[in-house]
Image (cartoon, rainbow, N blue to C red):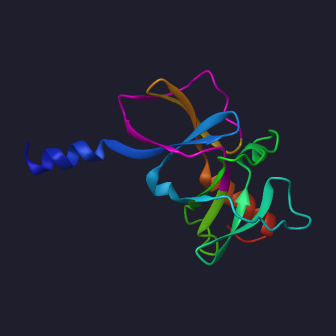
Amino acid sequence: MRAPQRIEKKVQEVASLLIPIQGRLLLAPNVTVAEIVPVSQVIPVEGAPVWYLGNCSWREQTIPLLSFEVMNGEDKPGVASRSRFAVLNTTGVNESLPFIAILTQGLPRLARVTEEEISEREDADNKPFELMHVSWAGEEAVIPHVEAMERAFLDYLHVDN
């Protein structure tokens, strides 16, 4: 196989992670996830919306910990022994917010997603912070709307976005 064909083949496959949250899986490209880290101390923020769980420390930075579930009108997830923080790269809506974190319910799994293996689930209604419901390799997952999560957090802070 010649180099251009190899390059083209690699572009057609998106390295992603299946991230377990309360009651379902999120599917996110690897470039969205900066790091999966053990649960550490969360510093609550007085008067914050219920979906803003508080701040956590990551690489000597303070990162907001958000609940994807609560943002979508669901129950607040608990912290289990396998829980982790998924630190997500933001989309650049505002440079003052380079990362957000979400609480997971276990370790993510690697997913090599191709166009042939993934399909949008037409039977599911997207909630405000869900970009799309998909089926991939026999699994059902949700692609999170990271930009909408960023904007909601920035709106809470009254920061232009």
**Depicted 74 relative to depicted 31: above or below:** above
Where is residue 100 shown, x and y percent of the image?
64, 62
What is the span of residues highlighted in magenta in the rendered image? Answer: 102-127
Residue lying furthest front:
81
Q: Position of residue 155 (x, y in %)?
A: 77, 63
Q: Is residue 126 magenta?
A: yes
Residue 54 location, quadrant: bottom right
Position of 55 relative to 12 (above/below): below
Q: Quadrant of the C terminus?
A: bottom right
Q: Residue at x 17, y 46 (%)?
A: 6
Image quadrant of residue 117? top left
Residue farthest toward the right in the current orientation of the protein: 47
Q: Residue furthest top?
A: 123
Q: Residue at x 74, y 51 (%)?
A: 67
Query: How many tags in the picture?
Result: 0
Q: Quadrant of the N terminus?
A: top left
Instruction: Tell whether 79 sits left or right of 104.
Output: right
Magenta stretch holds residue 73: no
Side of 146 where 65 appears, left or right: right
Q: Nearer the viewer, residue 36 or 126?
A: 36
Q: Position of residue 87 (x, y in %)?
A: 59, 60
Residue nearer the viewer, 120 or 13: 13
Q: Name the residue located 29 percent from the left edge and 47 percent from the top edge.
A: 11
In the image, residue 122 lies at what x, y percent? Answer: 57, 23
The residue most toward the left is 2
